[in-house]
Amino acid sequence: MSALEGIRIIDLSQMIGAPYCTQVLADLGADVIKVEEPTTALLTRVALSPPGVDESRRFSGYWLATNRNKRSLTLDLRHPDGKQVLSELVAEADVVVENFGVRARRSLGLDESWGFACRPDLVWASLTGYGRTGPDAERDGWDLVAQARGGLLDITGEPDGPPMKTGNSSADYLAGVHLAVGILAALRQRDQTHEGQLVDVSLLEAVVACLDGFPMWHSISGVTPKRNGNFHLAQLPGYSVFPASDGYIVIGSAGPSFARLMALLGREELATTVLPNGEAERQAWFDEVVDLITRWTSGRLRADLELELSAHDIPNDSVRTLAEVWSDPQLEARGAFLECEQSWLGPIRIVGSPIHLSRSPVEVRRAPPEAGAHNDEILRVELGYDDARITGLIEDGVLWGAGES
């Protein structure tokens, strides 16, 4: 039995953050019905399509990364009949997830009040850029915007360079995980009170919540951390990325492990617990340590560095390319990569869930679906529609996609 078996979620979201949230819950066993609108689904499905792919086979890396274990229903929610179908689905659902902008929410007439009218004990989960309240509630927000507003860009990058975004859509994924946690908490409370509620998560707050200890550093000292490249903002010279002869390696030494690193390099005296008083003296010490480590690592292979550092109990690992990640034996042993059959791409290898439950293991039950692949199944089995009603929806343009007939 899956952990969330029996929970049904209506997923009205698009792009990354909220779809990742619903995928996390789908992996845990929830029945997620992905409702796709014709005006937004195609953009979501082809964004970040790899170069060189035939136009007829275009697909989105975003889509494949955030939509497994879901069923797809394609509905025009701006059509009254489309909204009626949705209301019937919501009446039998436990959770609705959306990431509408303010204008879309108003034009569609879909918000928590509408949802609670369909089912009073519904959990309505909303992911927005800035949150549902406050002076910027009506502004649209994207991952990069949230990274900027939340201070993440300001502490990322080289000291003499511009602010730099993270390599992935970190704000989206952070917010998606927080939204999933909020949904689980709301469902747990509903078990006890039989009441639904709104779960309101913003990209902005998710970023600020995960800024490490630096907001508290500023709160207590008034000092604003500065960008420091690959070095820790706390000026730890042995905690960074260093060159190897065949790539790069990360060394994560601090405290006792830094002392062991300096001993390994024959310079125990540099592992001082009392830093020089003057700024110039501290910088000279920092530069000397960095130069020492760099000269040692740059002439060695990553694999040899890993063995030697690990033998001295110094945290480290190689910087891997994505090609190397796909063949990583540790990830293979953990079952991080899974094979599944995708309807228009054929057999594909996907990244699985990082969650491992001993009694209710996570399974990939479905590959990311083709648009409308489950129209017929959902309308006939879940809602009891007959041929005439389904045909009418198709003819009126309410249903579209692969499963429309």
Image (cartoon, rainbow, N blue to C red):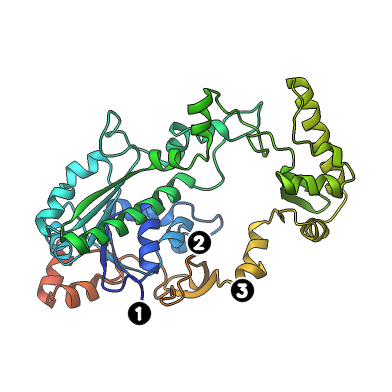
SS of the residue at dot 1?
loop
Front label number (2 vs 3): 3
Q: Is residue 20 left or right of residue 161?
A: left
Counting residues from the start of the chain, the first of labels 1 and 2 encountered is 1
Amino acid on which the number 2 mark rests in the picture: Asp
Amino acid type of the residue that numbered disc 1 sits on in the rendered structure: Met
Q: Mark 2 and mark 3: span between their CA atoms?
A: 34 Å
**In the shown orientation, is residue 307 left or right of residue 100?**
right
Q: Are marks 2 and 3 in contact (CB under 8 Å)?
A: no
> On screen, 202 above or below 335?
above
In front: 92, or 228? 228
* Label 3 crowd (10 A; few <14 / some 14-19 / many >=20): few
- The CA distance from mark 3 to mark 1 is 23 Å
Instruction: Using the rendered image of the protein, determine whether residue 294 is visible from the camera's viewpoint.
Output: yes
Which residue is rendered at x = 48% and y = 70% of the image?
Answer: 356
Quarter of the image containing the C terminus?
A: bottom left
- Badge 2: how crowded within 10 Å, few (<14), some, or many (20+)? few
Q: Which residue is mark 2?
A: 54
Ranked by sequence position, the earlier of labels 3 and 1 is 1
The CA distance from mark 1 to mark 2 is: 40 Å
Tell me where residue 288 appears, x and y as whole percent.
83, 33
Q: Secondary structure at mark 2?
A: loop
Residue drawn 53% across the image and 60% down it: 53
Q: Are marks 3 and 1 in contact (CB under 8 Å)?
A: no
Residue at 36% in and 67% down: 26
Which mark is first along the chain, 3 or 2? 2
Q: Which mark is residue 1?
A: 1
Which residue appears farthest toward the right when viewing the image? Answer: 266
